[in-house]
Amino acid sequence: MTLVDILIVAAYILASILIGIWFSKKAGQSKDAFFLAGRSAPWWLIGVSMAATNFSVDTPIAIVETVYSEGIAGVWFVWAGLISVSLVSFVFARLWRRSGVMTDVELTELRYDGQSAAVLRVLKGLYFGAIFNIFIVGWVFLAMYKMIQGLTPFNPIWILGFLAAVALFYSASGGFYSVLVTDMMQYVIALLGSIFLAAAALYEVGGITTLVTKLNERTTGTTDTTSFLPTFGEDGTMPFVVLGTYLTVQWWANKYADGGGKHIQRMLSARSERDAVGGSFLYAILNYTLQIWPWILVALCSMVLLDPSEQSDSMQVYSKTMTKVLPIGLLGLCVTGLVGAFMSTIDTHLHLGASYLVNDIYRRFLVKGADDKHYVAASRVAMGLILIMSIGLSISMDSVVGAWKFLLTFAGGAGATWIIRWFWWRANAWTEFSGMLASGICATALQAIFPDWHYTSRLLVTVAVSTLTWLIVTLLTPPTSDEQLVVFAKRVRPGRMGWGRIYDLAGIDRTKDIGVLGRNLMSVLLGITFLLGLCFSIGQLIFGEVFSSLVLAMIALVAGLVLYRLEQNRVSIEITTKDHEPSTLEKMQEQI
């Protein structure tokens, strides 16, 4: 990197600091302002912010690792997630926005009651606020460390420390306002940088035709690096059962089954139910169809451009390709994009982790009567602690993809419980508790005893054990009280399927919900069709298959138009937090 490149990165860092200072007064006004930007975010800002926090520095590294080991077909590990995100967009986004909670963990005491709900809230606050967030921030540090090693001769530790301090400053001072605004700036720079890098790498290779020819020359057995679908068989890149697991199990058996904390936080910050839906689907378009192809192209080009010795550490391939093909200025822009991606993920998880620890543990159980300024100050302290612990954990990690897959398996068995609680009144706090506990223990044991097992094998065993566990526990433990279920049903309106008895107790007109689930599922199917069509239309166009690209584009267009019409005719149930009827537990807390 030259002085020009470094100045471009410095300008971005300065802008992030100024944004934090600009929003500091507004963010300190209340908990809602600090954690949810006053619940005023528009759909386009929500969608871009979701995409920005997913466009982390670890993501291109993970895609490169995957393409190196399994070819383009290996990316189905990521693409399978578009099933889940479509379901979240057209089903769960509405439910989350109606709930009016501050964090997804807070939903625990809206959905359940009694001591078991309180214990579960503490467990999930620690589970997500500490374990998951620290784990995620840790592997992001690992990814950035590897990236810096390939870009500069300077000590990565000092650079990482400085960037993390900046992210901590603006997110702690400007609250969620600064997170959303910096995410917008970060995403535009990061996306442009990745596109420029892919174009420069492809130009350096000699074009797509030359790239495919050279890749075919290095292909062995039946493996086809550029195939969008797995090549099954003994020499194939992916067994059939692996792809089947991605498409039938992984998309729901994971932490993000009904949204995932960082995305739920953005849905809750939406100014309306429509904004929550629109923002979530915009994220799906950006994340699963647009930004992923530049990373794939860089991975493929690096196989041709870099010497075998430079490819020995696949976690440094992306940054080494940058320094090899980008001119002065563009290298600075691309590095700025990666710095922004790193800081976007850091600020999100610091903010999210603090919201769990402060709102769901500290405020709920330890210090109940303080004012909002006290809780905002406590949140800023919590952010610093999370950052320190994450840096310590990153030292013990050695693979981004490995960390990704272990975390998915760790929570995979509990994924079904986070879906079923919305659609079956009989689920109780012990359902989630037993699912989470069984999943974590099983995944950890399998990782220790059978480290050579494929990720999908461990996932299937974990899901099977956990599902059997939480089903038995649910049927052996008492259900949530009818009074609490009525409060939940009135506020969230989950639908009459699975809630008919509670709807009758609550006096909710069931006829208004007739066909709602069917329309939601139709939107989900149309969304999946649109996303897959658009994604592979872009891919086919990149590889010169114009006719098939046009066919896929037409399919995506038709699905998109029908989806738009269906969603435009839908009437949203807009419920603000002031309209919520407090639960018995909330009334008791106020009296105490």
Image (spheres, helix red, strand yellow):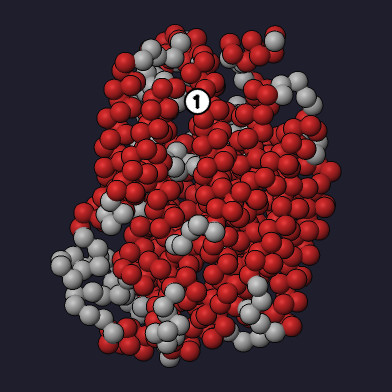
Q: Relative to residue 152, is residue 146 depicted above or below?
A: above
Q: Within 10 Å of the Cα at label 1, are there few (<14), some (14-19), or many (20+) other Cα atoms?
A: many
Hey, which residue is sitting farthest left in the picture?
234
Would you identify the image quadrant in which residue 240 lies? Answer: bottom left
Q: Does 182 sit above or below residue 442?
A: below
User: Which is nearer the eye, 245 or 399?
Assistant: 399
Instruction: Name which residue type carries label 1.
Output: Leu
The residue lying toward the viewer, choosing from 452 and 330, is 452
Residue at the spot x=78%, y=65% of the render? Answer: 14
Residue 455 rendering spot, x and y as whole percentages? 31, 53
Q: Is residue 361 left or right of residue 567?
A: right
Q: From the image, tell me which residue sits under label 1.
A: 120
Residue 134: give x, y in percent of width and height: 56, 47
| Percent position of residue 452, x then y | 28, 57
> What residue is drawn where x is 49% and y is 62%?
59
Residue in front for this viewpoint, 61 or 251: 61
Quarter occupied by the C terminus: top right
| Residue shown at 42% from the left, 87% from the top | 307
Q: Is residue 330 visible?
A: yes
Is residue 329 at all visible to an observer of this figure? Answer: no
Q: Secondary structure at mark 1?
A: helix
- Left or right of residue 41: residue 245: left
Q: Quadrant of residue 164?
A: bottom right
- Depth check: 16 or 292 in front? 16
Q: Position of residue 490 (x, y in %)?
A: 52, 18
Q: Name the residue located 21 percent from the left edge and 68 percent from the top edge.
A: 236
